[in-house]
Image (tube, rainbow, N blue to C red):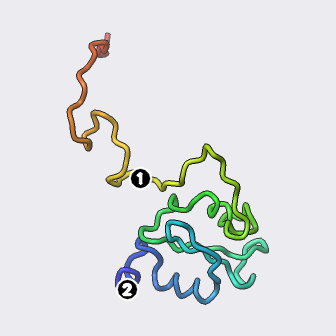
Amino acid sequence: MLKSIFTWWNGATIGARFTIGRRGVLVGEDAGGNQYYEAKDNSDSYDGRRRRWVIYQGYAEASKVPPEWNGWLRYTYDETPIQSPLPRQAWEKDHLPNLTGTVLAWRPTGSISRLGVRPEATGDYQAWKPD
C-alpha cells in the first residue's frame, strides 16, 4: 500500500487508481496480469474517442503490453482482444517484454556481465596508427 502512495513505477499510484476507478470501466486483462480500462463516457475524450488506460502488474514498463492490447490502447482496433481475438500465425512467438537490465537479458560471449572467459583474438586485427 505504501509503495503505491509514494512510487509510480510499481503499478499505478493511488491517484491514478482513484481516477481510473471513478472514470473508467475494466474491459480486460492480459496473460501478464496488466489490466485495461476504458472511459465510461466521452467527458474527457480526445478527438471524440473514449480514453483508454493500462494498469501494469508490477513494474511499469510499456514493453510489457502485448501487441494485441497495444493496438487497442492506440485505437488501431475498436474491439478488445477479448471480444475479437487476433488470428495467431504458426510462426509467431510468444510476447516478451524488453529484458534489458534484468537477469534474463541476453549476454553475448565475452560480455563483462557473463561468467566465463572472453575468446582469444584471432590475429586479424591491426591497430590504427596516425600518419
Q: What number of labels is visible?
A: 2
Q: Which residue is found at the position 77% from the left and 71% from the top? A: 47
* Comes first in the chain, label 2 or label 1: 2
In the displayed structure, 50 sits above or below 65; it is below
Residue 68 falls in image quadrant: bottom right
Marks 2 and 1 sit apart, C-alpha to C-alpha, by 27 Å
Residue on which disc 1 sits: 99
Q: Residues within 10 Å of mark 1 (few under 14, many from 20)?
A: few
Mark 1 secondary-structure assignment = loop
Is 69 situated left or right of 107 in this image? right
Corner quadrant of residue 46? bottom right
Instruction: State the residue position of label 2.
Output: 1
Residue at screen point 40% across, 81% down:
4
Q: Is residue 20 above or below residue 11?
A: below
Residue lying furthest front: 90
Quadrant location, the N terminus: bottom left
Name, please, the residue furthest toward the top: 131
* Residue type indicated by callout 2: Met
Label 1 amino acid? Leu
Q: 124 or 46, which lies in front?
A: 124
Q: Would you identify the image quadrant in which residue 11 lies?
A: bottom left
Q: As drawn, is 72 to the left or to the right of 105? A: right
Q: Residue 34, position in %: x, y?
A: 52, 71
| Helix, strand or loop under label 2 | loop
Give how far across and how far down residue 36 sits, in percent.
Answer: 60, 74
**Circle 2 Cα neighbour tier, 10 Å, few/some/many (<14 / 14–19 / ≥20):** few
Residue occupying image coordinates x 66% and y 48%? 89
